[in-house]
Image: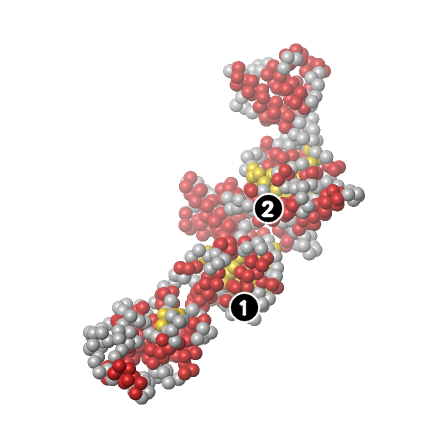
Amino acid sequence: MTHTLPPEAAPAVPVDTTPYLWTRLQLVEERVRRAVELRRAVDPDPDDPYRGQYLTPDAATRILDAPQGPGLPAPGPAAPPPGSPLDLLATRFGLEPLDVDLLLVAMAPDLDARFERLYGYLNDDLTRRRPTVGLALELCGRTGVAAARFRLSPTAPLVAGGLLEVTEPERPPLSRVLAVPDRVTAHLLGDASPDPRLADVLRKATDDPAVDPAELRQAVAAAGSGTRHVHLRTRGGDPEGLATAALQAHAPGGPGPLALDAAALAHHARALPQLARATAREARLTGAGVLIGPLEELPDQPDERARVLRTLCTVLRGIPLFTYAASGWEPAWAADTPVTLTVAAPTPDRHVTRWRHALERAHGEHGTGGDADALARSVSAHRLDAGQLRRAADTAVRTAALDGRPLSPDDLRTAVRAQNGAGLARLARRVEPAVGWDDLVLPAPTHRRLRELAVRARHRDQVLGQWGMRPGGGRGRGVIALFAGSSGTGKTMSAEVVAADLGMDLYVVDLSTVVDKYVGETEKNLERIFTEASAVNAVLLFDEADAIFGKRSEVKDAHDKHANMESAYLLQRMESFDGIAILTTNLRANLDEAFTRRLDVVADFPVPDATQRLALWERCLGGRLPRAGDLDLGFCADRFELAGGSIRACAVTAAYFAAASGEPLTMSQVVTAVAQEYRKLGRLVLESEFGPYLGEVTQV
């Protein structure tokens, strides 16, 4: 059994990877060699193959009678070269020279397998192949200094920082074993991969090429002062992009911030302390900051959310930390209150810059060009954070590249709609617009109101944000419109056209899922809808809105009080809404005057006149349905006073009659369909309207 180190032996890992680390390891090797020699000098039978497995009475007597020797001399100063991984590690964790020596002694078996057997020999226990606290202190020349033991206490930088683990706590302090976590060893060997334990909660942080310089200066200054914790409160801006830029300014050229997914943290609440410590160690190892958000995705229960944030803020104290949410910071979330900054929505020019940057980067990867500025302006009404914007640009460019054509605005709009989450779809019916301005048959004033609505939605950030045309705290940048008119006059279709013009989806709120008989539940359902609608690029449609936006009345009973409470809630919630909402009603007079005051656009939808009805008949029948020679649409338009929705129903019914007959569409089939629609609406079939065709429909 050989216990000496062969002089010609070389470390198991190539020395050219981290020269200084291997130089220091050679110093550890020399001290181990010297310790082995001292141990053999007093060992009566150093070649005993069972040494370390038993203790004879004579050996016990010798141990008791042996005087305390001076041990190994303390190593001379050997500071790591400035800028080396070991030097950066010592600086970031506040290590003293003794701490560095202890770390290298504990790490030696991970770098060279020979140290395992040698440590077993020096421990006088071949099953313990890592250094004990006592052996590590001996190899560092500190056996006679009792205070040196406290460099390995739970609060010491080595242990508290997660660089060194003191295992086997049931043993006496000097007999406990030291181990270096694999992540620390890998980092010193040049591996930049984060701790595997963080794989489920880490995500890639997104940058923003158009960060406001003033906001960035504020964020950088705040992250470098006090507790180094900054909370970003978003007002339509991109807090993650700002936080990423600020943290990169603190560590230029580094790996970027550690972005923790708040939703993933909520699913790993039990392992939160371990995840927090692993994050803190990773941040110090790489010199990176930490980003957490949005905080709304943490557990809903206030106590649980506070517990998560208190744990994270306590462990990450002293590390640059950015959190962000739509709301402010609650004092109960941490012992120290962070600096709170507001992130405003980007100006139109900054928004175009962000899109241009994302499109140019995507073009470089996929080779599809185009006018980036013009394309960016085509989606200027959409609010996206940096990550959503980058994904949308990449998807649109790849779609165009696969088809072998230049990128178009429609590609961008489709890609933007794909970024909408499913949250609102659970509360409202999603409609993907399939109509345009040419499909509308409306009076000129109504058409102008719709165009005005699209203009307001497209330029609201510039007018309400950049120019500040809606001052006052708590007021949102939403656009609210009212479409008033009889059933079937085109209100819902017009909302779909506006959504299509903006490149957005239309979400139709089903009031049956909103209104609840229990007090307060209706408001909760509406709050979920408004919150989700603010987070997606969509047009929100409240059909038959007078059901929940009705007039407040004198309170005579509990029902009146409850109804007034709902109306009061809706009044203040619409004031702070940041999205685009359209209310439709058949009875405009039923709406509360306070709602009317908060409307940006009011469009009236009258029953169409004869000219408009003729256009509607032509539009609804289309050009692919074969028509017989006796078809007289002018007669239908003049005689039958129907709204657009009813005309569409008649056209569809007549088309079924034609399909069943196998012949082109005839006038008889059309008037028969009209008669059916009359009876469905409760109207009389009169000769004054049907004229010569009355006989053909009397048997219907």
Picture residue at 57% right of the left edge, 60% below the top: 306
Closer to the camera, 192 or 527?
A: 527
218 lies left or right of 48: right
Q: Secondary structure at mark 2?
A: helix
Q: Which residue is mark 1?
A: 228
Q: Which residue is mark 2?
A: 533
How far across and how far down the image is residue 139, in percent?
33, 79
Dot placed on the residue nearer the N-terminal end, 1 or 2: 1
How far across and how far down the image is residue 669, in percent?
59, 16
- In the rendered image, the quadrant that contains the N terminus is bottom left
- Quarter of the view holding residue 480: top right
Report the Cα–Cα distance between label 1 and label 2.
33 Å
Q: Amino acid at mark 2?
A: Ala
In the current view of this chain or complex, which residue is farthest to the front? 57
How far across and how far down the image is residue 453, in percent?
65, 42
Against 31, residue 671 (above or below) is above
Picture residue at 58% right of the left edge, 23% below the top: 652
